[in-house]
Image (cartoon, rainbow, N blue to C red):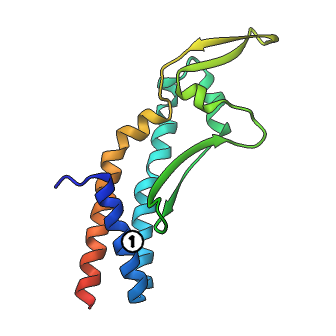
Amino acid sequence: MAVTTDAAAQDLATLARNLRDAGETGLRRDLLAAIKHAAATIPPVVRVQLPDRMPDRYAAVLDPDLDMGSSTRTTGTEIGVSVYARPRGRKKRKLPRLDHGILTHPLFGDRKYWYDQAITRGFFSGPVEDAAPRVRADMIDAIDHTSDELWRGT
């Protein structure tokens, strides 16, 4: 069954509210754990694909500087899961430019002269978009399972 992103978000919001109203902390915890697990599968896929999307040895330079993860929201108007990538520590990586296919680097290490190099677009957004249908399906399965458990218990 195909479910739109908006419909899945609405189902999640309704289910989260029903779980909260019913005082079902165990089912709520299980639902959030299943959703977080589904989203947590994306950052490792991004890391594995870095060498294919970056020139030469830059993937090995970039990988340790990437802080990637996900966050889950079940309240408010922005219900859903976000996957993020940001520079770790004090590194000033320009991740949006990299994702748009632009790598800026010094010419042979001379930091007075910087150049833009075209690279494969979507080092982050590509794997995330590729994984979205699978993650969405896993989340919908978790919502359906938790909903069934909730109604079975009432």
Q: Residue at x 45, y 56 (%)?
A: 81
Q: Nearer the viewer, residue 6 or 109?
A: 6
Q: Is residue 95 above or below residue 137?
A: above
Label tally: 1
Query: For the view shown, which residue lies furthest in the left direction?
Result: 1
Residue tagged 1: 31
Q: Amino acid at mark 1?
A: Leu
Q: Is residue 126 left or right of residue 54?
A: left
Q: Is residue 15 above or below residue 100?
A: below
Q: Is residue 82 left or right of residue 115?
A: left
Q: Is residue 126 above or below residue 115?
A: below
Q: Quadrant of residue 108?
A: top right
* x and y percentages locating residue 67 in the rendered image: 63, 45
* x and y percentages locating residue 145 in the rendered image: 27, 72
Q: Residue at x 49, y 61 (%)?
A: 72
**In the rendered image, which quarter contains the C terminus?**
bottom left
SS at circle 1: helix
Query: For the view shown, which residue lies furthest in the front direction?
Result: 77
Q: Callout 1 environment at 10 Å: few (<14), some (14 to 19), or many (20+)?
A: many
